[in-house]
Amino acid sequence: MSSIHSNTQVKGFQEHEIEQLRKEFPILHQSVNGKPLVYFDNAATTQKPKVVIESLTRYYFELNSNIHRGAHYLADKATTAFENTRQLLHGFINSDEAEEIIFTQGTTDSINLVANSYGRKFLKEGDEVIISGMEHHSNIVPWQMVCEEKKAHLKIIPVEDDGTLNIEAFKGLLSEKTKIVSVVHISNALGTINPVEEIISLAHQIGAVVFIDGAQASAHLDIDVKKLKCDFYAFSGHKVFGPTGIGILYGKRKLLEAMNPYRGGGEMIREVTFEKTTYNDIPFKFEAGTPNIADVIAFGTALEFTSKLGKKNIAAYEEELREYCTTKLLEIPEIRIIGTAPDKASVVSFLVEGMHPFDVGMMLDAKGIAVRTGHHCTQPLMQRFGIEGTIRISLAVYNTFSEIDICVEALKEIIKKWK
Ligand code: PLP
């Protein structure tokens, strides 16, 4: 830990607690290019604690069986473990019912599900879908596709210079033509925490349904879909210490029931004849085929792990880290931070004057420091700022102040050499 923070109690966690926590993440304790790994790419994916890795392997050692249909011991055990994750998610996001949680492959898959199952059924020619100028491509392309098919229009909430959304402009976009509003909770490229409660309330006043992309929020904020009153919410397991290839779509029961299934196959049916198929109840109506059973079970373990740490503790600690990181970076005159919204989560995007982000990323990697460079799947946002991309440090609860010091010193060296 940095001398500045030695023996100081950080909000949320004490120094020794973070040291203990790091022991739970085996991958962190390795050398990369001869240096201890500093992993600052958590917005892309988080690392997995031992309990999650063990949960995955335990499934294949002890439980492997197909679920729901089997009448034997293993099928019963696997089904119970699988459905337990749904129950955990029900608590994790405070949904009215566990049945409102659909397992998907991740956030991208969830957005595609709603764009196809809700959008294709309910959008009509001339209708409007509103997204924001800071969306991940996953929350742009599926809406573009359905709008093109239905001859509907995509409208964009503009982004201000500090990386906040222009809410006045959003109010101006809303009309009786607006049918869907889909916005990101926390921007993966800027770290902005959007005022989603206000956005949802405004959209509801004109009768639009609201989808919230929670990909970046799940590991950092308490999510309460009842309080938010959103119609749909999605996030991915791998960004909240869980496995890849699994995620959720939350939807209000009445909306999910009104939607057509997205994929056809096993499990999603009630009865099939060659003349007609009737569909299963939610959530199964949207879960065709054998699901990703092991990963869903390990996802549940990741949720328990996160809840045990406490989202409030995580957020408080990460805020200290982010503030420290921002302050330290700003001491370097060549660095410009992109995204200075007052309400931010643990992402710090920046540019180094005269250097391409990719070069900076490669040079940091040579020193064992993993950051992400490029457009972060937000090309329109980069265009808005007139840049090709940024260097992005994204922090997680297992990162430390001394890792930030290491990164800042590395940046200073890189810039000095480059000049
Ligand atoms: N939305 C946001 C804000 C993201 O950051 C990401 C991933 O980085 C996604 C959507 C897509 O998530 P996934 O690739 O897990 O489907």
Image (cartoon, helix red, strand yellow):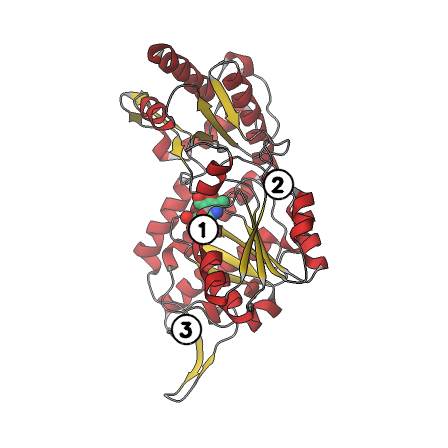
Residue 384 position, x and y percent, is 51, 37
In the image, what residue occupies the spot 55% across and 13% down?
Answer: 4
Q: Is residue 113 visible?
A: no
Say above or below: 218 vs 319.
below
CA neighbours of label 2 inside 10 A, class few (<14), some (14 to 19), many (20+): many
Disc 1 secondary structure class? helix
Is disc 1 in contact with disc 2, using a CB cutoff of under 8 Å?
no
- Between label 1 and label 2, give the one nearer the viewer: 2
The three-letter code of the residue at mark 1 reads Ser
The three-letter code of the residue at mark 3 reads Glu
Left or right of residue 207: residue 293 = left
Residue 138: mark: 1
- Between label 3 and label 1, give the one nearer the viewer: 1
Disc 2 secondary structure class? loop
In the image, what residue occupies the spot 63% across and 34% down?
Answer: 343
Residue 234 position, x and y percent, is 52, 53
Left or right of residue 325: residue 388 = left
Q: Earlier in the sequence, mark 2 or mark 3?
A: 2
In the image, what residue occupies the spot 44% across and 73% down?
Answer: 268
Q: Which residue is mark 2?
A: 165
Of 418 and 62, nearer the camera is: 418
The residue furthest right is: 205
